[in-house]
């Protein structure tokens, strides 16, 4: 994808001028996530927000089990 996630540099922006294969991968991710109801964040290729969040004002606090 051209950068690690949580790498806060302009190279991480989805529209950054980078290698064509990396750009194609980012565009594919953005296309699939948008089709599934998520909105992209313009400064992080990995960051998406659910458009119709069912509980926008609710903070959930519960443990998540990792197997």
Image (cartoon, helix red, strand yellow):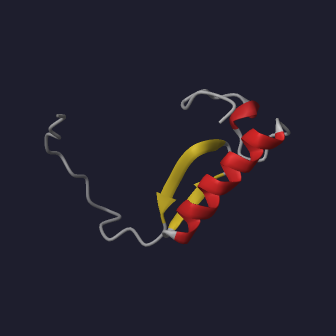
Please report the residue visible at 65 percent of the width from the left and 28 percent of the height from the top: 3
Looking at this rendering, what residue extends furthest in the front direction? 21
Determine whether 18 is above or below 57 in the image.
above
Query: Where does residue 27 sit, x and y in percent of width and height?
Result: 70, 54
Please report the residue visible at 21 percent of the width from the left and 51 percent of the height from the top: 60
Closer-to-camera residue (31/63): 31
Q: How many marks?
A: 0
Query: Where does residue 20 sit, x and y in percent of width and height?
Result: 82, 42
Query: Where does residue 31 sit, x and y in percent of width and height?
Result: 63, 63
Image position of 60 (left or right of 12): left
Closer-to-camera residue (31/44): 31
Please report the residue visible at 43 percent of the width from the left and 72 percent of the height from the top: 52
Image position of 13 (left or right of 58): right
Determine whether 31 is above or below 47 in the image.
below
Please report the residue visible at 38 percent of the width from the left and 68 percent of the height from the top: 53
Q: Quadrant of residue 5?
A: top right
Closer-to-camera residue (54/64): 64
């Amino acid at each position: 994808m051209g950068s690690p996630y949580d790498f806060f540099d302009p190279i991480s922006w989805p529209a950054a001028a980078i290698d064509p294969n990396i750009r194609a991968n980012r565009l594919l991710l953005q296309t699939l996530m948008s089709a599934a109801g998520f909105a992209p964040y313009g400064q992080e290729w990995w960051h998406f927000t659910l458009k119709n969040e069912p509980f926008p004002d609710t903070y959930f606090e519960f443990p998540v089990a990792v197997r």
